[in-house]
Image (cartoon, rainbow, N blue to C red):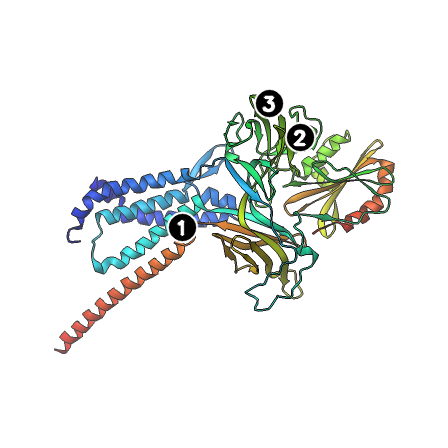
């Protein structure tokens, strides 16, 4: 490399151009297209045994029991149903629907995110009962702390004429879960003790 | 041309860009306390200019973004080599060091463009053979008739724009995007736009986008499915819907759904156990780890691994990190990263170290030789 400037004379223009062009083209590399693929079902052999090479132990006799035998879906909700409550057909957005002995209805739904925020949701429920919307401060003051199993949640209790609505809701695993009890004031009043017990029993496995 | 290149090779530019880089890192780091990390990264580091919104609705440029700084650094260094660098063996340490720095810059750009991050949320006992994008989603038409697998026709988010007609010969139907709502408030009620599916019972009111690592938008799309130039009906689909809808095409039932984008894995991963250790007497996490079972029938693999905070699992070109947990310690969240440029920063650091080492040693030897010569002269 005795005379570098002569060697580089021919290199400098194309090299710079190539570098600049490659960098400009790069952002376009992520163009997405329609994809068609085969998606095999998740495979878990029922009683097969697996061992951890990192733990230094022999797991050849390790039986993982029933939990290893089934593939379950995320955010499986478990609960203890109070006496006399009947489960009815839920629907697409409603995960579970129940009718209490007093004929109040309980619908359990879950949506990603905060679904527009607490204030907007409470005012939407107020609208459903024919009540006027309230300010942020009024809504916040009306909220009471509650629990969904061990998870922190809020409860709102709204009534207009004979209609009443009690919703306990909270953010769990990135989703807002709503436990909405609707009916007449009398139906709700009778269902509330069992509703409280029901909420303490819920659990996300 | 050479004059222009020399101007670009100026050391002043290097100093200014380095200062701009330091200011950007400081501003970007401070911004992460005010906004989600992802947003801060996008605004400060994955941009050409950092814009600041004003109260009157206007935005003004305040800093050079990460891409601009990286490009100027690259151009500055390249110009310096093309115009002023003396190509000698004793200076090759600097050359190697700079090659490492260039590799670091280019590697970061490759990572931004080509790396894919997704998550795997597994409850105790769950088994999955896919990971899901956190923010990206897809419209899928699924043919579930296969014995061992489903045929999935996946339309990416970028194609879901209002008015777009998706016509692909591989798909069983044409999909006309009537309207796309990036976020919507969903309420139960009669919706007259869809003629098919669950969406007939749901009202979707457009809502502003929400941002944040733990907040999700309920995206919705109205679609018209067209087969043999005839409309099969209109559907409202949403990422908030739990179940998929169905559509009959030529006597065959397909599923249709708007869902978080899935990345299929060549293996199945099952959560066997999640362990969350806390410091004694407190709720402060000390460590958490997931014991998972990996089944890859093609490779004849069936064994368990423990993924913990600093011990990711690397398999099939992907890295599985322990990212979080939820649901009273019954759910684990694994971050799945596919980064083809993952090795570049390591190689770059090795090159910089070698270059610095070589440069230091050659200078040290030269210094010692001069010192010995001087001492000899003094003694003489």
Q: CA distance from mark 3 to mark 2?
A: 17 Å
Residue situated in front as seen by the camera: A35 or B343: A35
Which residue is depicted at the point 68% across and 26% down? B191
Say which label, 3 or 2, has the lower sequence index: 2
Is B11 rendered above or below residue A92? below
Label of residue B231 in the image: 3
Is A80 rendered above or below residue B308? above
Which is closer to the viewer, label 2 or label 1? 2
Q: Chain of mark 3?
A: B
Extreme residue in the front direction = B147
Which residue corresponds to mark 2? B199
Say which label, 1 or 3, has the lower sequence index: 1
Dot 3 falls on a residue whose secondary structure is strand
Label of residue B22 in the image: 1
Dot 2 falls on a residue whose secondary structure is helix
Extreme residue in the left direction = B380
Q: Can residue A168 be seen in this snapshot?
A: yes
Q: Position of residue B173 (x, y in %)?
A: 56, 28
Q: Position of residue B157 (x, y in %)?
A: 53, 35
Q: Position of residue B73 (x, y in %)?
A: 33, 47
Q: Residues within 10 Å of mark 1 (few under 14, many from 20)?
A: few
Which residue is depicted at the point 63% across and 60% down? B276
Which residue is depicted at the point 43% across and 43% down? B113
């Amino acid at each position: 490399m005795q005379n570098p400037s002569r060697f580089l004379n021919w290199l400098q223009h194309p090299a710079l151009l190539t570098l600049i062009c490659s960098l400009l083209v790069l952002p376009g590399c992520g163009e997405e297209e329609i994809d068609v693929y085969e998606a095999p079902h998740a495979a878990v052999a029922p009683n097969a045994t697996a061992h951890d090479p990192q733990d230094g132990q022999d797991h050849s006799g390790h039986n993982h029991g029933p939990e290893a035998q089934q593939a379950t879906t995320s955010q499986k909700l478990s609960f203890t149903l109070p006496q006399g409550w009947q489960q009815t057909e839920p629907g697409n957005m409603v995960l579970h629907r129940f009718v209490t002995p007093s004929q109040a209805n309980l619908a359990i739904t879950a949506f990603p995110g905060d679904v527009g925020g607490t204030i907007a949701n409470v005012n939407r429920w107020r609208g459903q009962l024919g009540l006027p919307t309230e300010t942020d401060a009024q809504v916040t003051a009306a909220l009471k702390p509650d629990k969904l199993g061990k998870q922190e949640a809020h409860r709102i209790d709204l009534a207009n004429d004979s209609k009443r609505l009690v919703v306990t809701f909270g953010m769990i695993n990135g989703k807002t879960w709503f436990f909405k009890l609707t009916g007449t004031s009398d139906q709700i009043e009778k269902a509330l003790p069992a509703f409280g017990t029901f909420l303490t029993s819920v659990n996300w496995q | 041309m050479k004059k222009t290149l020399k101007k670009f090779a100026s050391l002043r530019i290097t100093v200014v860009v380095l200062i701009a880089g330091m200011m950007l890192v400081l501003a970007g780091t401070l911004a992460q306390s005010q906004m989600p990390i992802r947003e801060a990264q996008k605004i400060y580091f994955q941009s050409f200019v950092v814009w600041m919104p004003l109260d009157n609705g206007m935005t003004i440029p305040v800093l050079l973004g990460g891409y601009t700084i990286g490009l100027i650094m690259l151009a500055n260094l390249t110009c310096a080599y093309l115009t002023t660098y003396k190509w000698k063996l004793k200076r090759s340490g600097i050359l190697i060091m700079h090659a490492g720095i260039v590799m670091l810059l280019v590697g970061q750009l490759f990572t931004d463009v080509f790396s894919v991050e997704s998550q795997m949320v597994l409850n105790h006992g769950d088994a999955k053979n896919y990971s899901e994008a956190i923010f990206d989603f897809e419209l899928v038409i699924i043919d579930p008739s296969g014995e061992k697998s489903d045929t999935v026709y996946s339309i990416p988010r970028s194609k879901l724009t209002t008015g777009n007609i998706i016509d692909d010969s591989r798909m069983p139907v044409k999909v006309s995007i009537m309207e796309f709502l990036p976020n919507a408030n969903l309420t139960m009620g009669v919706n007259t736009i869809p003629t098919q599916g669950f969406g007939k019972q749901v009202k979707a009111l457009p809502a502003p986008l929400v941002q944040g690592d733990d907040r999700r938008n309920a995206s919705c799309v109205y679609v018209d499915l067209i087969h043999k130039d005839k409309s099969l009906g209109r559907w409202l689909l949403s990422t908030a819907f739990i179940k998929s809808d169905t559509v009959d095409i030529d006597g065959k039932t397909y599923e249709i759904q708007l869902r978080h984008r899935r990345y299929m894995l060549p293996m199945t991963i099952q959560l066997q156990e999640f362990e969350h250790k806390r410091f004694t007497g407190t709720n402060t996490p000390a460590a958490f780890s997931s014991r998972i079972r990996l089944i890859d029938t093609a490779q004849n693999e069936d064994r368990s691994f423990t993924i913990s905070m600093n011990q990711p699992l690397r398999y099939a070109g992907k890295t599985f990190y322990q990212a979080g947990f939820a649901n009273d310690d019954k759910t684990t969240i694994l971050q799945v990263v596919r980064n083809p440029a993952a090795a570049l920063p390591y190689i770059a650091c090795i090159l910089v170290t070698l270059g610095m080492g070589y440069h230091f040693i050659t200078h040290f030897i030269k210094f010692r030789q001069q010192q010995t010569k001087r001492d000899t002269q003094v003694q003489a």
